Image (tube, grey):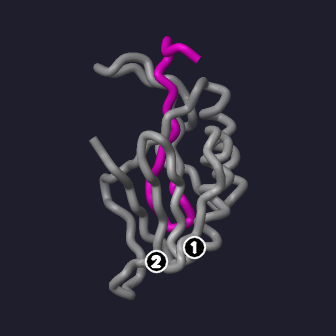
């Protein structure tokens, strides 16, 4: 459904360190900077990017918005969460853990990245590892 997701940041270096660490835990390669200073994480299923806003205004985060990253198992969710906290992220929502809802059993952890964007890592309990 999505070709890419892009987040704004006021500090590409800090954001890249955060995402290299958290996405590295999930098995993704470090982001690549383009000639405009944007950072991209390219995968076979889509692209995640971070950029300084094109309009020159300060970056803001979406109130109510969340981007979720797939994790291979519960341990990876916990490792992702810890890597984020150690690289400038902050706690938000409940601690990492199992949540049951209409979509089944989900093991989820939430963070705010250094720019305030809300992200999560999610493992669908019962999925093949």
Question: Which span of residues is magenta-colored?
Answer: 112-129
Crowd band around label 1 with a 10 angstrom C-alpha radius: few (<14), some (14–19), many (20+): some
- Give the number of marks: 2
Q: Quadrant of residue 18?
A: bottom right
If the image is split into quadrants, where does the C terminus sit? top right
Q: Earlier in the sequence, mark 2 or mark 1?
A: 1
Q: Is residue 84 above or below residue 44?
A: below
Q: CA distance from mark 2 to mark 1?
A: 7 Å
Q: Is residue 117 magenta?
A: yes
Q: Is residue 105 above or below residue 11?
A: above
State the SS at label 2. loop
Expressed as whole percent of the image width and height from the top left, the position of residue 95 reads 56, 37
State the SS at label 1. helix
Expressed as whole percent of the image width and height from the top left, the position of residue 51 reads 46, 72
Mark 2–mark 1 CB contact (< 8 Å): yes
In the rendered image, which residue does mark 1 sit on? 12
Left or right: 6 as drawn, with respect to 17? left
**In the image, what residue occupies the spot 67% across and 63% down?**
17
Q: Is residue 86 above or below residue 38?
A: above
Left or right: 29 as drawn, with respect to 56? right
Expressed as whole percent of the image width and height from the top left, the position of residue 125 reads 50, 17
**In the image, what residue occupies the spot 31% across and 53% down?**
64
If the image is split into quadrants, where does the N terminus sit? top left
In the rendered image, which residue does mark 2 sit on? 52
**In the image, what residue occupies the spot 37% across and 17% down?**
104
Q: Is residue 120 magenta?
A: yes
Crowd band around label 2 with a 10 angstrom C-alpha radius: few (<14), some (14–19), many (20+): some
């Amino acid at each position: 459904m999505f070709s890419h997701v892009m987040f704004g940041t006021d500090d590409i270096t800090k954001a890249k360190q955060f995402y290299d660490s958290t996405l590295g835990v999930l098995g993704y390669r470090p982001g690549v900077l383009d000639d405009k200073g944007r950072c991209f994480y390219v995968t076979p299923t889509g692209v995640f990017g971070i950029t300084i806003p094109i309009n020159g205004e300060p970056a803001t985060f979406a109130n109510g918005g969340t981007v979720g990253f797939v994790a291979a198992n519960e341990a990876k969710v916990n490792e992702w969460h810890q890597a984020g906290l150690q690289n400038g992220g902050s706690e938000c929502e409940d601690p990492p853990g199992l949540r049951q809802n209409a979509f089944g059993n989900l093991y989820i952890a939430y963070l705010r990245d250094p720019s305030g964007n809300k992200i999560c890592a999610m493992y669908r309990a019962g999925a093949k590892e």
